[in-house]
Image (cartoon, grey):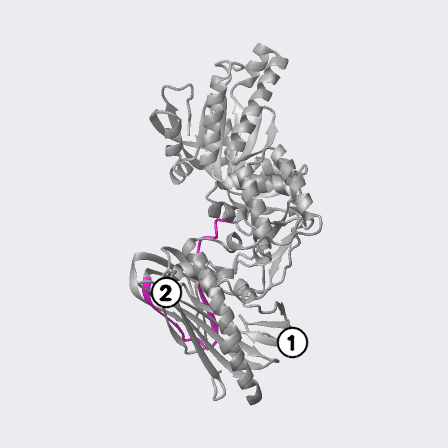
Amino acid sequence: MINKRTEHIRWNWKLKSRPKEIWPFVTDTNRLFKDLKQPSVQQAHITQSVKPGFVQLSYNGLNRYEVWEEEPYEWEYPYRFGVVRHYQSGPYKDLKIQVDIKEHSMGCELVVDVWATPRSKVLSFFTTLKLRTLVKGRLKKVLNLYDQLAISQRRHYQVAKPKKLVRGGKKRLSQIKEKLHNSQVDAAVLGKLVEFICRADDLDLQRISPFELADQWGISEKKVFEVFIHAAKADLLNFNWNLYCPHCRSVQESVKTLNQIYEPIYCNHCEQEFKVNFNKTIQLSFTPHPLVRKINPEQYCARGPQEKSHIKVQQYLRPGQKRYIMTDMPAGTYILRTNRSDGTATVHVSDKGSETVHINIGSQGLRGEEVGMSCNPNLSIENTSDKNQLITLEHKEWNGQGVSAARATSSQLFRNVFADEVLRKGEKISVDNLTLMFTDLYDSTAMYNEEGDDKAVSHVIDHFDILHEVVAKEDGAIVKTIGDSVMAVFCDPTQALRSYLRAQLMIAEDDRFNDDFQLKAGIHHGSCVAVNLNSRIDYFGSTVNIASRFVDFASEDELIVSGDIFERHELQAVLDEFGKHDRIEDVSTQLRGFDKESFAIKRIQISDSPLRLAI
């Protein structure tokens, strides 16, 4: 790209924040370019074919139209990022930007290098002057703001002035707040949400995550999510279901209701089809209701490090190129990918990993290799293949701050308020991790015979009320009742166990029930399939069947869970919360319908308690 007409400009600023503190701000290139007063961008169609990893973009500036082909962003968390653009029109022919963040004792030094190749000699003077004055001044102001936010751990909206609402929006907002207060919504959380809607800019409001805000506010996710549900019902918010590609983790579609999901989905980035699941790839996000505040959906950068924050290193290497990477990666498991290979490699990052690691991408691609690497390695990456390679090192775990479809639809409040949120008939969506709990009454036939139908039915209904209460308290949901039995779903087995133990204690302390009223249950955790059955979300599969067989196997006041689930999810700690136990019995048994499989379960007896549990 560099030739004799290329102008090189370097700026550097001393900042008080550390590289990891300033990184989320400066790498949010969508906001950065907006703050630098750059025009919004759109996808363009310059040529029929686009190189893998490249994107064609354009923008309409004041009295000008520019079109360019953009190479993939490159970055090394948290020290460097940059991009190269090849313009088809406008004052530049090529433009390369690189930002280096160098740590020092008082914070960091941020160095910006710009290489600009004007399209003609006449434009060279003017384009260079613009970069050296106007852009530099704006960038200095923006970086000072980002530095202050980073060291104070505040967000943009917390220092911003209130934004203009739509006509009549202020009155409508006041009416909604009064309505929600009368519904006994948490006033403190509602106040923070209203402040966020009024002060945040359009970029923050395009996809609001209640769990991300809960983390910022230091409030429980459950409290914040409950306020969001009520706010959506009251038309303060709207919500969408975002469908993420499981490979590149970018949003490929956004639908207003679950019944608009049609599989398979096509990913424009990966150029392949994929199926979604309730745990990761379908996530719920919110926006302000347009009658309160209208959002401009414009983009100022199509890509950037913060758009894919799970990727810690991304490099675009041509054949024969080698790079020495500087990074400081959090401990964990990472996946190494290239856009030219279907295979992957696994990188385990820890303090005990190798200090020097060389990654070679050859013609055979990646084939499941595993390597251990330190958090601050001497890392080099080399492309010895005959193709350009976009190489990424990404965190294996997904961002836990998104509200997955599994989390939303296992909330009793969400299912009650938005009962019409169901899949279309015939659609089957996988759920990778879900906890199913079945409860039943032990020897209910004897209860009906001894007490009569009216009294027995009253007891059954009363115990359903208790189960609804304890299940909802643990962020679960009752899917359906079947006779005297209940089928409930949770995201975690600990929630199911707590709800069962609470139900047992409440029944034991309730004068409406005598000692013969005995509740048993079965809990299992695993994968299943979500479907639309009788206009509600229901679940099918082996995990469901095993949980239902567990409750059939249980005796009075017993809970059955597989030994593997008991150990992996540390259910022992939950039992300790509810009382002293003095015996754990391991049992191996077969279940009806699973004749060829043996199940290891645990039986735990609780002493000094009306409970006797088998787990």
With respect to residue 18, does 457 lie above or below? above
Q: In the rendered structure, does residue 93 fall within the stretch colored magenta?
A: no
Q: Which mark is residue 108?
A: 2
The percent coordinates of residue 555 (x first, y second) are 46, 22
Mark 1 or mark 2, which is nearer the start of the sequence? 1
Tell whether 540 sits left or right of 219: right
Q: Distance between the residues labelled 2 and 1?
A: 37 Å
Residue matched to label 1: 65
Toward which corner of the image does residue 294 lie, by quadrant? bottom right
Instruction: Tell me which residue sits at (49%, 78%) in the image.
Output: 132
Whether residue 19 appears in this view of the structure is yes
The percent coordinates of residue 331 (x first, y second) are 36, 55
Nearer the observer: mark 2 or 1; the answer is: 2
Whether residue 73 appears in this view of the structure is no
Magenta segment:
376-401
Instruction: Tell me which residue sits at (41%, 63%) in the image.
Output: 77
